[in-house]
Amino acid sequence: MKVQAPKGYHWMKSGKSYKLMKDPKDGYKKHRGSSKTASFAIQKVHKK
């Protein structure tokens, strides 16, 4: 599932996951590891 970053933030790739990072004052510009959307796997059942 693709998830849009909240307004004023972008996703940064962190290993196999993502972290949110605040956009710079001069606005977001694409850079290595960054994206406005991130893909996450859907877990359908709880694991014990």
Image (cartoon, grey):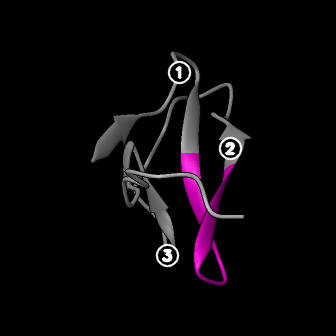
Res 20 label? 2
Which element carries disc 3, helix, strand or loop? loop
What's the CA distance linking mark 3 and mark 1?
19 Å
Q: Residue at x 72, y 64 (%)?
A: 48
**In the figure, residue 41 lies in which quadrant?**
bottom left
For marks 3 and 1, give the one nearer the viewer. Answer: 1
Q: Residue at x 37, y 53 (%)?
A: 42
Res 32 label? 3
Disc 1 residue type (three-letter): Pro
Q: Given contact means CB atoms under 8 Å apart, are the residues at marks 2 and 1 in contact?
A: yes
Q: Is residue 18 left or right of residue 3?
A: right
Give x and y (percent) for residue 45. Answer: 46, 52
Q: Which residues lie in the magenta part?
A: 11-19
- The correct choice, above or below, for 3 with respect to 6 in the image is below
Which element carries disc 2, helix, strand or loop? strand
Give x and y (percent) for residue 10. Answer: 54, 41
Question: Which residue is at the far left?
Answer: 1
Disc 2 residue type (three-letter): Leu
Question: Which residue is at the far top?
Answer: 7
| Mark 2 vs 3, N-terminal side | 2
Q: Is residue 9 left or right of residue 36?
A: right
